Amino acid sequence: MAEKHGSSITRKSFFCLFMATTMLFVSSWLFVLRSTSRPNFFDRTLFPNEKLLTIFNNGHSESSSQSNVESSNGSSRAILANNEKDHEEGEGEEPPKREVGFQDKDGAANCNGNVKEPLKVFMYDLDPEFHFGLLGWKPEGGSSVWPDIRTRIPSYPGGLNLQHSIEYWLTLDLLASEFSDNPNNRAAIRVQNSSEADLIFVPFFSSLSYNRFSKVNPHQKKNRNKVLQAKLVRFLTAQKEWKRSGGRDHIVMAHHPNSMLDARMQLWPAMFILSDFGRYPINIANVDKDVIAPYKHVIKSYVNDTSDFDSRKTLLFFQGAIYRKDGGYARQELYYLLRGEKDVHFSFGSVQKDGVNKASQGMHSSKFCLNIAGDTPSSNRLFDAIASHCVPVIISDEIELPYEDVLDYSQFCIFVRTSDALKERFLVNLVRSIKKEGWTRMWEKLKEVESSFEFQYPSKEGDAVQMIWQAVARKAPAVKMKINKSRRFSRSVPRKERGLRTIPSPSNFW
């Protein structure tokens, strides 16, 4: 009996050992399979356990796995299709966001589905001597600092004064926004409470002040332009709005390169609206904080342009001042290089003696128009060329262009480095190499974009006034961030010391 009992125990032990060994073998095999296949965690078709299940089912792992992949992809396509359908029907969408100052030209929403919202601008009620008073306008009865633009609009002087008149058009547009039936059709609206504003607008006609009042009269110690700049600095730096932001959210217009020469060094935290950065150190004005605005073209727009490549007989056109200082040396060099070419017009010209009409006729009958750097990188000639549908050839290495963050100038302009342009026959050979098809494509694009460079009152969607406001609006978030960052430690400064704090110098501000 003892022998029989011992034999039973031996068989049970052997059976247990066999089962344990078998389970260990199976577990090891599963572990090996899992470790040799490390799939994307989210790709269910390649999970090892599914692959193993396929092998157990029919022993054809490869073909079955492929079938599973195709089935899964089919399911993914169905899910995508359903999602697209839901999107089209508007199911499960978040309500559209309102985005400040960003809009397309075709409707009320941009490509992201965001409903447009005009930029909210607070404008100081400066004394008329800073704006329309410079045009000879005087308040009637002293009741308002602004003209009633619903009855009469003070006119702006013509000639070359017009090219830097953006201050006039932007101020008119803000005034008009108060009488608009549909504010959401505007790029910017005026608000009366500065705490509600995105930015603060300074309505000083600085270019006009420079053009008309920069000379000293015999009975004056300082010219009127300098006096107005000094008064403006005192006024702005005393305002709660300026103190609140250090001036960072203020918009100051200085489109003429010589305007605001005295005040710019004190108002540098503000956002400047300029024609270029030619006469500014980078710590005072730069592309990150400031806005480049177009000149108002002086020559006539080419209305109902029926010209073509063959009817424009002049290959290359330039008319203007030839001998310039600073970066304008290229003009005289190019004059000597091009004056002998039979189909190139390169001559001296000015606004005097019917110069504007002659330039209009010349540009309207030319295929390409030269825009060469003068005393500064920019020139009104570029915008005259756009209005003429004459393909601009830009020779200005340091030029900055209006709203280039949304507009691709290479589609309708030709850019040539100055060093290349001054090589013998380089420029002529380049423009001659552009045939009818390529030129016509750029000519068509010029007609599409020309409205973006037109100043008018009342402003229209997509014109120069609206485009400038939109460019300003795109800077607003960065301005807000800088202001918020500047307030990080304001509460940690003892109250007695807060009055001693000053704005950092331009050298370490940006």
Image (cartoon, rainbow, N blue to C red):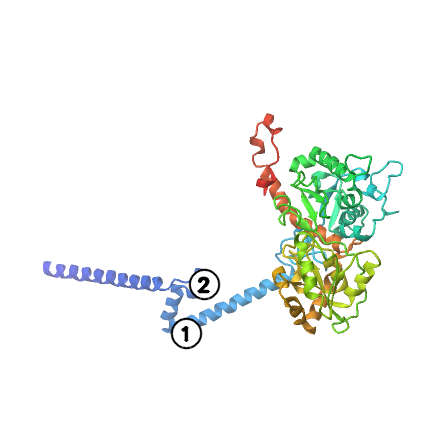
Query: Seen in the image, is 126 located left or right of residue 378?
Result: right
Residue at image point 68% right, 45% down:
272
Q: Identify the residue shown where x is 76% and y is 49%.
A: 166
Q: Where is the C terminus found, in terms of image quarters?
A: top right
> Real-space Cα distance between discs 2 and 1?
17 Å
Q: How many marks?
A: 2
Which amino acid, by three-letter code, is at mark 1? Ser
- Residue in view at x 82 percent, y 34 percent: 219
Image quarter of residue 263: top right
> Mark 2: which secondary structure?
loop
* Amino acid type of the residue tagged 2 in the rendering: Asp
Q: Position of residue 165 (x, y in %)?
A: 77, 49
Extreme residue toward the top, this view: 496
Going by the image, does 53 lie left or right of 464?
A: left
Is 118 or 74 nearer to us in this picture? 118
The crowding category of the residue bearing disc 1, from other C-alpha atoms within 10 Å (few below 14, some 14 to 19, many at least 20), is few
Q: Which residue is mark 2?
A: 43
Q: Is residue 422 visible?
A: yes
| Tag of residue 63 | 1
Residue at 79% from the left image edge and 50% from the top image edge: 161
